[in-house]
């Protein structure tokens, strides 16, 4: 079938392994799914944090955000090869490291992450459409973004790929148009490049925020590559995902930096974008709001798959189908809608704290997952064992993985810098947060050493 024919078909699979005769797509699809899904308002707001929260100047903000994306995308893209090789969602594959019940710790945290991003995107979508209308609340925008997201999550994998493929060209063009308009038509303040300054903690903070933006995608990646033929290859899958996500993130983040510096302090970045693009604001805001819906469709879809994975772990005989995915997506949307309505008045503070929290719980998971896949097993897993009642050769709980995961969180605490808690090392560094670097540096080698010493559940070569 063609891409268009695939996109109009309801996906019948959920968390089951994808048969080889159902595989389709190319590495190019991985570029567009990550490039197109990042061209949205939340990416712009995340970039704006470098100048609104960390008070960096334009040059330092752009450098910090670029470095963070380049570094973080490495870990995100390394997960891309797991989908074509194993053909299962990322959270199902996590059973290979943590065991069937041990993986629930990570799966539960990831579901909360999806709900958080869902709520954040709903707030921005509603705020965006309200900013270009008069006398209308943010509810119509929330309803539009939510409706598009739910439909795409119900239809599934191929419609989401088609959605982001379209957004790659449409939102990409609008992003270029917006930047050109702001610079040449509206004009920028003469002192824009001189505004704010440099601080070591702010620079490291902007690197961390951008790196986390990429690492936060790690639980998503296999969900959108698991239908790819095995012949796709690890290297093409890596680079397509890497550059798609890096370029798709850096460009709107730079626009967020410009908006954040050009507008008065404490003003909304979304409203600021509408002011700076006056004349074409409806086009810019509507397209980037629709981009929010594309990203939220991915959040809903991945959240549904993770929730089904959680449920199938508790009831192993259950094989969820498209109806279960649809009902789950609707329920998750309802929960995220409630969170959005409750937290929208303090959105930026809540969102900043939320992504910092993700930093501490996702880093050790990705370190363990990648070390296990690339160093210990070289991609060889017995996929059928993932779905067994007793966890198969991977067991119910892998003490080594769970223990290293908790250690990976604990070793970060002295380096944490948040409004709620600042560790002693971070305080000595002037508030610079290097926890994610320490988490990666400690968790991977400790896990590899302990796994080689005590773990005996490796699948035989060729079992994938």
Image: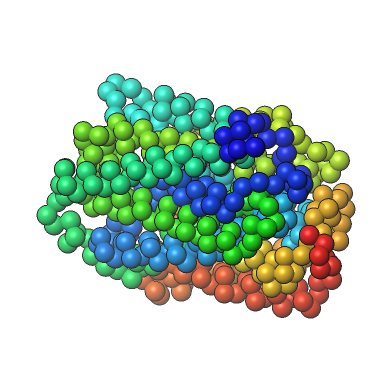
* Extreme residue in the front direction: 1
In the foreground, 22 or 335: 22
* Residue 402, image x, y percentages: 72, 63
Task: Classify 28 as above or below 208.
Answer: above
Task: Classify 26 as above or below 463.
Answer: above
Q: Quadrant of residue 400?
A: bottom right
Task: Classify 441 as above or below 177.
Answer: below
Q: Quadrant of residue 326?
A: top right
In the foreground, 130 or 410: 130
**Colour convention of the picture:** rainbow
Q: Residue at x 72, y 51 (%)?
A: 87
Q: Is residue 221 left or right of residue 404?
A: left
Q: Is residue 5 left or right of residue 390?
A: left
Q: Does residue 405 appear in this view? A: no
Q: Quarter of the image containing the C terminus? A: bottom right
In the foreground, 316 or 154: 154
Q: Is residue 456 left or right of residue 246?
A: right
In the foreground, 75 or 112: 75
* Residue 256, image x, y percentages: 32, 50
Q: Residue at x 57, y 70 (%)?
A: 440
- Total numbered badges shown on the rendered structure: 0
* Residue 199, image x, y percentages: 30, 68
């Amino acid at each position: 079938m063609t891409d268009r024919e695939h996109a109009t078909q309801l996906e019948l699979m959920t968390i089951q392994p994808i048969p080889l005769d159902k595989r389709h797509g190319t590495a190019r699809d991985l570029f567009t799914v990550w490039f197109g899904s990042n061209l949205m308002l939340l990416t712009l707001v995340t970039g704006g944090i470098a100048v609104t929260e960390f008070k960096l100047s334009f040059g330092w903000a752009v450098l910090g955000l670029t470095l963070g994306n380049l570094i973080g995308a490495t870990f995100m893209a390394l997960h891309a090869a797991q989908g074509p090789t194993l053909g299962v969602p990322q959270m199902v594959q996590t059973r290979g490291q943590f065991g069937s019940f041990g993986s629930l710790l990570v799966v539960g945290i990831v579901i909360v992450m999806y709900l958080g991003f869902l709520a954040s995107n709903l707030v921005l979508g509603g705020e965006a459409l309200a900013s270009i209308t008069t006398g209308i609340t943010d509810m119509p925008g929330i309803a539009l973004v939510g409706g598009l997201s739910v439909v795409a999550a119900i239809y599934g994998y191929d419609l989401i790929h088609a959605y982001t493929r379209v957004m790659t060209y449409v939102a990409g063009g609008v992003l270029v148009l917006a930047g050109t308009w702001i610079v040449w038509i509206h004009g920028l303040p003469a002192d824009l490049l001189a505004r704010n300054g440099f601080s070591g903690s702010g620079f490291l903070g902007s690197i961390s925020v951008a790196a986390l933006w990429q690492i936060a995608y790690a639980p998503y990646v296999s969900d959108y590559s698991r239908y790819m033929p095995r012949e796709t290859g690890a290297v093409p899958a890596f680079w397509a995902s890497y550059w798609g996500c890096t370029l798709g993130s850096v460009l709107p983040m730079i626009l967020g930096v410009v908006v954040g510096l050009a507008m008065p302090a404490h003003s909304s970045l979304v409203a600021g974008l509408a002011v700076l693009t006056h004349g074409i604001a409806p086009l810019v805001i509507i397209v980037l709001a629709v981009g929010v819906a594309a990203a939220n469709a991915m959040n809903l879809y991945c959240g549904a798959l993770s929730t089904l994975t959680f449920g199938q772990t508790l009831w192993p005989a259950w094989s969820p189908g498209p109806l279960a995915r649809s009902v789950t997506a609707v329920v998750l949307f309802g929960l995220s809608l409630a969170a959005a309505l409750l937290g929208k008045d303090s959105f930026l503070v809540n969102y900043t704290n939320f992504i910092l929290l993700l930093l501490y719980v996702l880093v050790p998971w990705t370190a363990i997952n990648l070390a296990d896949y690339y160093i210990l097993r070289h991609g060889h897993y017995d996929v059928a064992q993932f779905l067994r009642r007793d966890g198969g050769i991977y067991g119910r709980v892998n003490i080594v993985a769970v223990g290293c995961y908790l250690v990976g969180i604990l070793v970060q605490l002295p380096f944490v810098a948040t409004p709620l808690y600042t560790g002693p090392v971070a305080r000595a560094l002037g508030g610079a947060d290097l926890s994610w670097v320490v988490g990666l540096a400690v968790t991977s080698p400790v896990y590899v050493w302990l796994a080689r010493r005590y773990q005996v559940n490796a699948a035989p070569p060729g079992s994938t």
